Amino acid sequence: MREQLQELLQSIHLDKSESVITNQLLELSISLITQSDYDSEYFIIKYFSGILDYSEAEAQWQTPKEYTLVLARILFCMQVIGLEYSLPSAERDTMNVQGSSAPHIRLNQFRSKWLVEDEPTPFNTLHKLLNYELTAAKDGVGFHWIRIDAAEKWLYYKREKLDISQLKKFQYMILRKAEEVL
């Protein structure tokens, strides 16, 4: 996997053709999706999805309602990449519909091994986590749009970070301008 990543980086730096880079990216993505829990290498998608759960802007873990969307997007991408790998778009029109290499058989073979629950795959881990997050989010309250940090220096509105002292100056300036107009 490390070699694939290095080849991809070299291709990008050497300005190779878009099709070469796309193929290398597809191969790297497939190798990430088809990692087994029992592989000696790091389970990269699992760790990466854990990092995505932390919101650096808010300096806290995301709520299940927010994180569920991230997991759903990753799982959807895994399914689309699996489709492209099993049935390359360049070959779809000329594929043989009969026999052991029929499109639906190739797609089902990939899906039944790598995109199902209860198998030692990244998809299984993320899908179970998504199910847990959906259950946790179901009973959760709505989003907290406004939050102030413990030091009372920053106000967070949605995902925006505002300096409270600047906000106070802004309010004072608006008030002065309104008094001048009146």
Image: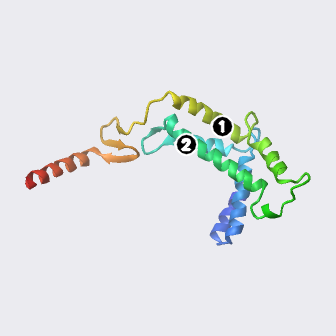
Observer able to see residue 175: yes
Badge 1 crowding class, 10 Å Cα cut-off, few under 14, some 14 to 19, many 20 or more, is some
* Callouts 2 and 1 close, C-beta under 8 Å: no
Q: Residues within 10 Å of mark 2 (few under 14, many from 20)?
A: few
Q: Amino acid at mark 1?
A: His
Residues 71 and 7: in front is 71
Tell me which corner region of the image, top left, top right, bottom left or bottom right, holds residue 2: bottom right
Furthest residue in direction top, as rendered: 139
Looking at the picture, does residue 5 appear above or below residue 148? Answer: below
- The amino acid type, in three-letter code, at marker 2 is Leu
User: Residue 41 got which mark?
Assistant: none
Q: Secondary structure at mark 2?
A: helix
Q: Is residue 58 left or right of residue 84?
A: left
Residue 26 rendering spot, x and y as whole percentages: 71, 58
Report the number of numbered marks. Answer: 2
In front here: 153 or 171? Answer: 171
Query: Which percent across, then down, holds residue 102?
Result: 86, 53
Q: Position of residue 6 (x, y in %)?
A: 69, 60
x, y percentage for residue 37? 74, 38
Q: Residue at x 91, y 51 (%)?
A: 100
User: In the rendered view, would you say 170 is above or below 125?
Assistant: below
Q: Nearer the viewer, residue 7 or 178?
A: 178
Dot 2 or dot 1, earlier in sequence: 2
Disc 2: which residue: 69
Q: Which residue is at 77% across, 38% downward?
A: 38
Instruction: Tell me if 56 is positioned left or right of 145 in this view.
Output: right
Cα distance, mark 2 to mark 1?
12 Å
Q: Which residue is mark 1?
A: 127
